[in-house]
Amino acid sequence: MNGHCATTNTASGASRATHLAKIIGESTAKIEVYRQEQGLPPLSLGPDAPLDVKYPPHIEQHRRSLIDASLELGDLATGPVELRLVPGWAVMTMFAVTQFIFDFDIPHHVPLGTEADRDGGSISYESLAAAVGVGPSVLRQVLRAGMPYHMFHEPRPGHVAHTATTKVMARQPLIKDWTGLSNDVLLPGAGGLTEALQKAPAADDPAQTGFMFARGGGEAGMYMYLEKHPEQARRFAGVMGAFQQDEAYAPRHLIGSWPEDLQQGGKRLVDLGGSTGTVAFALAEAFPGLEIVVQDLPGALKAARTREGKKVAFMPHDFFEEQPVKGADVYLFRWVLHNWPDAHVRRILQALIPSLKPGAKVIIFDEIMPPAGSMSLSVERNQRNIDFGMLILFNSKIREVEEWKQVISQADSRFKVADVRYPADSRLSLIEIVWLP
């Protein structure tokens, strides 16, 4: 049974809903006490609310518990029929309104005032309509559709003002990129999934994904599509870059779990798909004796620069082709292979074989999906969302640990998984492979 499955009763005999309500009350109280102690206002999405509060671990745990319990209790109260009928409509509304808000640059035409300002820094619908070139009536209709989702509010009739969420939209360009990517890539890809699976049920070809059938225009895969659509490529790179900024993806997690026998001087490392070398330079800083070659496609290396005193070099290379660096001690794939179907992962690993010396290591530092039902509700939803995105864009997946072991052994039985490590607070885990011919 899933760890977050909504059962009728808890062990004590109380209803599940009552148990969840207790968690919500207790966690909320802990958070509010902390905020008061820190001089922060109560939880709010109003225009004066802090945009991004970072909590210490013990309070963050209460925040996650509050989110999980609220999600589940909301589902229980909604019931099975409404639960399946309503969410799709809500998601469509949220994304469509968000896209409208960005396309007409609404956040920058509404004053970034505070509640202390007259009308909270609001603007009349008529003035806003004139500024953005949309009729006042339809502008009001669209913005009001977003207000139940905390996008803008009306401090008085006929006027619109920011909430905390729309202030973020005004100040964070990434949200615009994410919305555009969702509307133009993810949603069409999801809509094309059924056709893709009807025509290519094995889901093992990057050219036959949901997105490729919906919008791909006959390209051989998502990366080839992005090469010909620079605006989508820019959005995609921006969103992926934001993920990389998350502390859970920080290079320190790789450094902290790096095998001891690969830390000594004179070891040669090849970082495949390493882009401009952010991770390679972090490894070089932590382990100065490493000699590192970063490999990627020529376009990805355009912005790459060597650094004085660091043993990091760059080499154009397609990792589907035979590995040109012979006899290195370790070959690294960091957050790369989850974008490829199993058959392609096997090809990537097999391309290393002619260059591997006995005892050479391959390090995969990537997502490992925990078993179904072992995560909290919010974490599982997030992980499954990412996993589903991998499917509709790449026909790939976030693999469970046994799936990783299987694809590695299928590439060649001489690849032996020596260890799997799960760094604390990291979204990525380390799989250590030894080549034993």
Image (cartoon, rainbow, N blue to C red):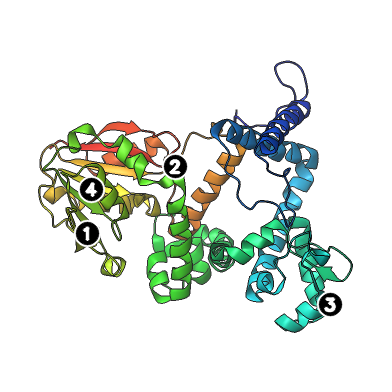
Q: Which residue is mark 4?
A: 284
Query: Would you place residue 341 above or below residue 5 in this image?
Result: below
Answer few, some or many: residues within 10 Å of disc 3's Cα (few below 14, many 20 plus, some between 14 and 19). few
Residue 417 occupies quadrant = top left
Disc 4 from disc 3: Cα separation: 59 Å
From the viewer's perspective, is 213 left or right of 257? Answer: right
From the top left corner, tell me how far across and down residue 330 is, in percent: 19, 44
Q: Earlier in the sequence, mark 4 or mark 3?
A: 3
Q: Quadrant of the N terminus?
A: top right
Image quadrant of residue 156? bottom right
Q: Position of residue 315 (x, y in %)?
A: 19, 62
Measured as percent of width and height from the top left, residue 355 is found at 12, 50
Three-letter amino acid code of the residue under disc 4: Ala
Disc marking residue 427: 2
Between circles 4 and 2, the one closer to the viewer is 4
- In 3D space, how far apart are the residues under numbered discs 4 and 1 (Cα atoms)? 11 Å
The residue wearing badge 1 is 307
Is 175 positioned to the left or the right of 363 in the image? right
- Looking at the rendered image, the disc whose residue lies closer to the viewer, 2 or 1, is 1
Q: Which residue is tagged 3?
A: 137
The secondary structure type at the circle numbered 2 is: loop
Does residue 221 appear in this view? no
When asked about the image quadrant of residue 48, the answer is bottom right
Label 1: few (<14), some or many (≥20) within 10 Å? few
